[in-house]
Image (cartoon, rainbow, N blue to C red):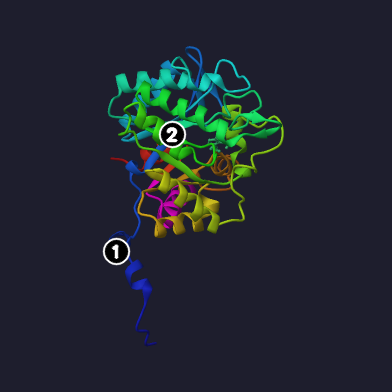
Amino acid sequence: MELLFRPRRLRKTDALRRMVRETHLRREDFIYPMFVAPGKGVREAVPSMPGVFRLSVDQLVLEAQELVRLGLPAVLLFGLPLRKDDTGSEAASPKGTVQQAVRQLKKLLPELVVITDVCLCGYTSHGHCGLIHQGAVDNDATLEVLAQVAVSHAEAGADLVAPSDMMDGRIGAIREALDERGFEMVPILSYAVKYASSFYGPFRDAAECAPAFGDRRSYQMDPANAREALKEAALDVEEGADILMVKPALPYLDVIAQLAAEFDQPIAAYQVSGEYAMIKAAAQNGWLDENAVMLESLLAIKRAGADLILTYFAKQAAALLGK
Ligand code: PBG
């Protein structure tokens, strides 16, 4: 048969396939999310996220050394407070778990990029990402608190701050507060496009931050909307976002691709706890090949247009990719 084009010609051998491969995963692509717990010697497994632990600062530092050895460039820190209250006051405390962790990491492992999650849900007794006024999350009152949280992280030495609350105007408020305090060189990684997703379930166990009443749909995005994602990203860019994130990742590849096509900021994607848990659970049952599915999902996220991937698989993937 005379076929002019035979795509299989370039798939004949591994060497050929590698030569024409369009997308490559690198260890530098990954950011590893970690949970900082109060206390000492704490290493508490998160049952719905096998391989993920809540770590006190001393344990976190040990784990971070391992990450550096594996060639991973960055971590994202979530804090668990000692005490929660109505306004999440511990979130901006210089003595908070995250602030302590940042100081230690920057002292002991200065080359590791430390990113901090800026949000209130882990710190408020009601579990919402902002202050409550008359039964609803008060956008503008929350901005001031978020700005204080971001400044406290920068003061501790955070390399980047990553607001995940989805209040309107938060990037501008945080940028202004950072600049006023002399942190004009601290970039903002914005959770620009964060959906009200059911894939966050296991994370809420890990960070103990499930809302006590209602849900997050009045501030996080409707999973049905893609054009609105472009609007959210455009607003964040206007307000000074340096990196734009889409979250979750695999169920929203179309949104990642649209943002990558539309914006010149680096694009990050967050492979969230539920995406991780699904692969782990299927693998534990012997239903999927864990490493193969993990690498394929990360590759798909990158192919869609993500420059950076936040993933609980970062360590595992880095170990497989090698030096
Ligand atoms: C807090 C926050 C959440 C996640 C990151 N930051 C949970 C939420 O919004 O309910 C989810 C991360 C994950 O599922 O891995 N605002």
Q: Which of marks 1 and 2 is in front?
A: 2
Asked if marks 1 and 2 touch (Cβ < 8 Å), the reply is no
Q: Which residue is drawn at 36% across and 34% down?
A: 74
The image position of residue 218, as x and y in percent, is 64, 42
Q: Which picture quadrant has residue 5?
A: bottom left
Does the magenta run of residues contain 150? no
Give the left or right position of residue 290, taking residue 70 as reference. Answer: right
Of helix, strand and loop, which mostly describes the magenta segment?
A: helix
Sequence-wise first label, 1 or 2: 1
Q: Is mark 2 on a helix, strand or loop?
A: helix
Assign a secondary structure to mark 1. Answer: helix
Q: How many numbered tags mark residues here?
A: 2
The residue identified by callout 2 is: 174
Residue interval drawn in magenta: 293-308
Q: Quadrant of residue 315?
A: top left
Judge whether 262 appears above or below 289 on screen. below
- How far is the residue under mark 1 from the one under mark 2? 49 Å
Q: Residue furthest top?
A: 40
Can you tell which mark lies on residue 16? 1
Ligand 1 falls in which quarter? top right
Magenta-colored stretch includes residue 296: yes
